[in-house]
Image (cartoon, rainbow, N blue to C red):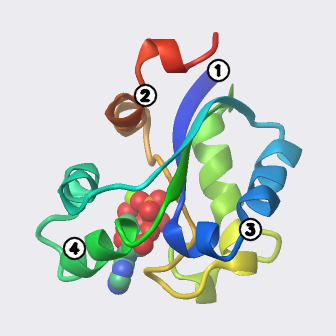
């Protein structure tokens, strides 16, 4: 079934100029980009995005990191897009990420792990609408 998922190329990756390389891996996987933009979040916007993690010990550090520089947010579409993109990203901690995954190739550590992807149908819908309106998406 065709799905949409939210991708974020995180500040550590944008800063190292590997946005294009990551987008190539996404496109080579057959996922279609149906919306995309570069933004620089405020601390409040990062806190809002990661609100589900607000009780976690890494919340303050994570939200500082996510607003430390620009990110590239996009909406990816395809059959099973949510699970396929999670698989392509690899494990949260790059030490555990499989060969051929984005995090294996680019992530620096468990926090600066280069990409975000939605983890379910409902979170995908919430996350997409956090960043994009209908006019900003094709199809
Ligand atoms: P994401 O939600 O960014 O796609 P994920 O679903 O693999 O990643 P989550 O458990 O949702 O992982 O954690 C969200 C983000 O918080 C991680 O991607 C990472 O940047 C950061 N994070 C997770 N665990 C830790 C940790 N133990 N220490 C520091 N940062 C962490
Ligand atoms: Mg997550």
Work out whether residue 33 or residue 97 is closer to the camera in this orientation and state it: 33
Distance, label 1 to label 3, CA atoms, is 30 Å
N-terminal label among 2 and 3? 3
Circle 1: element type? loop
N-terminal label among 4 and 3? 3
Judging by the rendered image, the residue that carries numbered circle 3 is: 18
- Camera-side mark, 2 or 4: 2
The tag on residue 93 is: none
Left of 36 or right of it: where is 66?
left
Residue at image x 22%, y 63%? 43
Judging by the rendered image, the residue that carries numbered circle 2 is: 132
Judging by the rendered image, the residue that carries numbered circle 1 is: 1
Left of 106 or right of it: where is 14?
left
- Camera-side mark, 1 or 2: 2
Instruction: Say which quarter of the image contains residue 113.
Output: bottom right
- Camera-side mark, 4 or 1: 4
Distance, label 4 to label 3, CA atoms, is 25 Å
């Amino acid at each position: 079934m065709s799905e949409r998922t939210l991708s974020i190329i995180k500040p550590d990756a944008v800063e190292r100029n590997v946005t294009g390389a990551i987008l190539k891996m996404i496109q080579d996987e057959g996922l279609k980009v149906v919306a995309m933009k570069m933004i620089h979040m405020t601390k409040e916007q990062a806190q809002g995005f990661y609100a589900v993690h607000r009780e976690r010990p890494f919340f303050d550090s994570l939200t500082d990191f996510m607003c430390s520089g620009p990110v590239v947010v996009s909406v990816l579409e395809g059959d099973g897009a949510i699970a396929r993109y999670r698989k392509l990203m690899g494990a949260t901690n790059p030490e555990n990420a499989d060969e051929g995954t984005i995090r294996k190739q680019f992530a620096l550590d468990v926090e600066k792990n280069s990409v975000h992807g939605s983890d379910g149908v409902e979170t995908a819908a919430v996350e997409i609408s956090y960043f994009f309106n209908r006019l900003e998406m094709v199809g």
